[in-house]
Amino acid sequence: MHLFGIETEYGITREDLDAVDPVEESMELVRAHLSENFERRWDYRGEDPHEDARGFRVSGLQQDKEEDDFAKLDAHRPYSFHDMKSDLVLPNGARFYNDHTHPEYSTPECRTLKDLLAHDRAGERIVQRAADRRNQQLGGAHVQLYKNNTDFHGHSYGCHDNYLVSRSLPFPRLVSGLLPFLVSRQLLAGAGKVGMEAQESGHVPGAFQLSQRADFMEAELGVDTMHNRPILNTRDEPHADRTKYRRLHLILGDANMCEYATALKVGTTRLVLDLLQCGAAPTVELEQPVVAIKQLSRDPELKTTMRLKDGRAWSGLAIQEEYWNAASRVCGGSDPDADWVLREWQETLRLLKEDRAQLVGKLDWVTKQWLLETFMREERLTWEDPWLASLDLEYHNVNSERGLYLGLEAEGKTWRMTTERDIAEALAAGPADTRGGLRGLCVRRFSAEISGMQWERVQFSGGLRSRTLEMGDLFEPDAVRACAVLLESASSPADALAAWTKRKES
Amino acid sequence: MRYMLMPDRREAPGDPMPKSPSPSEEGGGPRRPDTGSPDKDNLLKRMRKVDPKQAERYRQRTGE
């Protein structure tokens, strides 16, 4: 069973103001998407980030002192919690809302990389469309949005990739098998960054590194996401039947502009999870993963080696090759996505060693480095020049008139894997074979009757009988399609749910 | 190299991702980009328009 999705927190700014209020701006941006008044629909009872997969519960999540101070001010704002979050569920099954002062777009659940890429790109279009509407209200192109992970002052925001995993896979095995892979995954999926930084200590201009987020990884494991961030997040919030499933919630990844990098990031992680499920993951153990992830990020020449617990010293490429070898033995031929990932993963590792220029337009860090070095030669700049951090930021602008990546894409210098038609379809509806598609279908067909929604259920109003579409264990594609047929043909949610119950009981 | 099927796979294969592109490939799917100097196009112009102090002014609150 494969199911994955991406949550992206966007950076937001107003260029006409000296001081920007990110809470106000994120709220206004999300609401600019609406053509009608905001209605409270997201049901937060399904969210509990305090359960730890290691078998305990924490009383609270950490944040730094600066955020503590902001939170005190937020408490005095004239808005309710619901108003501030401004949660929307879109007709394509995605969630669009204000999360921790950032507009966040969460794709609907996807089963294939092709669907995931289309929905990730649809997210870019939706947030930019909201910015265009907001800018119309403001009378100028003042609001700009960035699909990146840092403000170059020590503040990071996330792009989380999520995977449905069987709970039969013991969590310690998940940890030991994933950590070395995740530390080295930045070779494929790093978005690149100018300089170094750390939470609360600002930015040091200088040399280019592979990853935006590596500087902010401070622990191997942990339930926190805003402070003391872990390489492997232990939040046990499955958004599914918890007796059967986990949700692997990875917070270490960068937001990718390159479609190819997104496909490799999620595709290789999916294969490693397959390896773990059948007990075939390589036995590689890093001595100091938190040191290693920074060390690797800060070496674009890819020469650095990391110590393993058994005394050997391996490069990031060697670790990735070890995982590829294992995956190629076990996962080849299992489905088209697996075959595509195996082929492109191997080729990418070869090109990283032999001919990196071939990866321009495929991997973000390689593309950004190429772009910046070309500019440095033209303008006779050094890595310390502040202009480079500004160009780094602008690489991620999702305004097609300004963004550097989107400029490259418009000139045909990137590897497109979606078509405009794929994106248009992803804007209109969720995947036909996942519950994300059902969620979107409910919004399109029965919007007025929905009283509450969350990832695993849709609650309809009216009547004494239960009016809930339960989706905590609705993952089989055939079952999803059957449920969709009933929702499409029923004249009311009650009729659809009655028919669905009858079908399940038969 | 030995290939074997994953035991828990039950889904029908979907559309494959585009194959690794070749320079002659046209139409849908990925295309090999021209990775020559961006001198030849408008990209350097776009880069020169970026305010050197933009990142200095850009401030966000910590997210997740």
Image (tube, coloured by chain):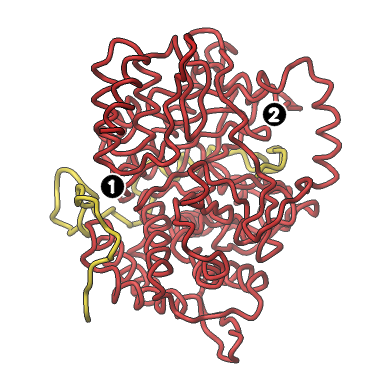
Chain colours: A red, B yellow
For the question of whether residue A216 can be seen, the reply is no
First in residue order: circle 2 vs circle 1 = 2
Q: Which mark is residue A22?
A: 2
Chain ID for label 2?
A
Farthest front residue in view: A506
Residue depicted at 51% across the width and 48% down the height = A255
Q: Residue at x 68, y 38 (%)?
A: B58
Tell me if residue A36 comes above or below residue A387 in the rendering: above
The foreground one among A42 and A287 is A42
Q: Is residue A164 visible?
A: yes
Identified at 55% across, 17% down, the residue is A135
Label 2, secondary structure: give it. Answer: helix
Task: Classify residue A94 as left or right of residue A477.
Answer: right
**How far across and down, in percent of the image, does residue A366 sit?**
45, 61
Please state, as top left, top right, bottom left or bottom right, where the N terminus of chain B lies in the image. bottom left
**Neighbour class for label 1 at 10 Å: few (<14), some, many (≥20)?**
many
Q: Nearer the viewer, residue A319 or A279?
A: A279
Report x, y in % for residue A344: 29, 64
Q: In which chain is the residue bearing label 1?
A: A
Q: Amino acid at mark 2?
A: Pro
Mark 2: give few (<14), some (14-19) or many (20+) Cα within 10 Å. Answer: many
A323 is higher (above) or lower (below) than A245: below
Q: Amino acid at mark 1?
A: Met
Report the residue at 53% width, 21% height from top.
A452
> Mark 1 falls on what kind of element?
loop
* Residue linked to disc 1: A417
Q: Going by the image, does A226 lie left or right of A194?
A: right
**Image quadrant for the C terminus of chain B?**
top right
